[in-house]
Image: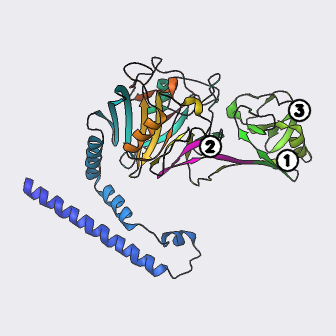
Amino acid sequence: MDTLFFVDNYELRRLTEVTVNVTIIGVLVLCQALLPIQASNMKIAKVTAPGFDTSEVKVKIFNRLNPELKKKAFDENISNKYPKAVINDVAEGVKHIKMTKFYSGRPVRINVVEVDMDLAENLELTPALSSNNTLKSRRTISTIAKNNDALVALNGTYFKFENGVPLGTLMIDKKLYTGPVYDRVALGIFEDGFDIARVQLDATVKGSGKTVKVDNINQPRMLSTHVLVYTPDWGKFAPAAPKYGVGLQVVDDTIVKATANSVEIPQNGYVISGPKSILYALLDKKDVKLSIKTTPEWKGVKHIISGGPYLVKDGEVYVDMTAQKLASIGGRNPRSAIGYTEDNHLLLVAVDGREGSSIGMTLMELANFMKASGCIGAINLDGGGSTVMYVNGQIVNKPQMKGGIPLSNAIIFARTAES
């Protein structure tokens, strides 16, 4: 019976492979037939564009038809990549790896969660705030994880220690909560992959025939000349306007109040704060329209979490902390990082430091580690005292404060609604 079962499975796999090949050949023939046609349908034009990689499509289809082969390949990949590590299964397609490496003859403890995004179909990677009601909040990573039913969590982007406001671009479920700081690098999370870029805000307020550039959204003021927008996510009240400035309260795209004092942020609107010389031009007709985009535009992006600096860019080590005004985080420290591989694996990394049993990493050491782990793109996240990783209900690294300091936000893996 065992032999017959093996033969049947073999024949089934062969039949499946032949079917896949025939299907792809049919698609290619159809594409070739459509190439000369000047299609007005953009979807057809995209399908028939040169460079269509049929081998990649074939592998993806075949992997879906053979999940056990994909799982076995993932297991072998992790075992080969981390030969001296302790490896534990977290969920389908999710591995937790604990290891100690030596730098300059001294130990560094490293925790890695690596996820095969094709296998982990019932999990979603998303940033998570410490509170659903306001950006001004801080909670431990265990609380953030439990509130979001997360299997895995790692501390996220930088934040203002006094009140918890994230410092940098943060988008969750296509809603932009905060804008970029110093155009720092960010990770874009899409339905089918990832991208990394230095993100800039492309936002305007239009009204009375004028267009006013918006410098940032829900961020602390850096210059009195900046125009800032505060949404209800900031809190109940917007900050007072800068010297020689004004705050415009907007309800349903209409300016209803202008004041230099702190003003309430309406639930169905926002507050524009900036110099009078710029904003008074909007008061003529009082109807305004806020437009918020990012550069790059990142069409289809679902979530964005910023950090900095780059660690790996286009498959090469690339650390640009001076360009991103991050010189203060140099040296050997606890570190957190996120990266992705060419075969759609996602890596979360926590490095312990500032103690004899784990001295931490420099940014260059972390960048080399991410590249050696297969990342083609990776960025540094908030580190130091913030570095903390949570897996299956437990803190798995040793942060400086037991349980980790209260955080503004985290990057988490949580089960999807349909799972």
- The dot on residue 244 is 3
Label 1 amino acid? Asp
State the image quarter where residue 239 is shown.
top right
Q: Is residue 413 visible?
A: no
Q: How is the image coloured?
A: rainbow
User: For this rendering, which residue is in front, 243 or 91?
Assistant: 243
Q: Position of residue 1 (x, y in %)?
A: 7, 54
Q: Is residue 35 visible?
A: yes
Above or below — where is 310 with respect to 351? below
Secondary structure of residue under mark 2 = strand
Secondary structure of residue under mark 3 = loop
Report if residue 194 lies within the magenta region: yes
Cα–Cα gap, marks 1 and 3: 23 Å
User: For this rendering, which residue is in front, 166 or 70?
Assistant: 166
Crowd tier of the residue under label 2, counting other residues whose Cα lies within 10 Å: few below 14, some 14–19, many 20 or above: few
Residue at the image point whose x is 83% and y is 43% from the top: 254
Give the magenta-colored segment's residue range: 180-203
Above or below — where is 12 with respect to 367? below
Label 3 amino acid? Tyr
Residue at the image point whose x is 48% and y is 72% from the top: 50
Q: Position of residue 198 (x, y in %)?
A: 60, 46
Above or below — where is 266 with respect to 118? above
Cα–Cα gap, marks 3 and 2: 32 Å
Per the image, the residue denoted by label 2 is 175
Label 2 amino acid? Lys
Per the image, the residue denoted by label 1 is 287
Q: Position of residue 373 (x, y in %)?
A: 37, 43
Report if residue 70 lies within the magenta region: no
Q: Nearer the viewer, mark 1 or mark 3?
A: 3
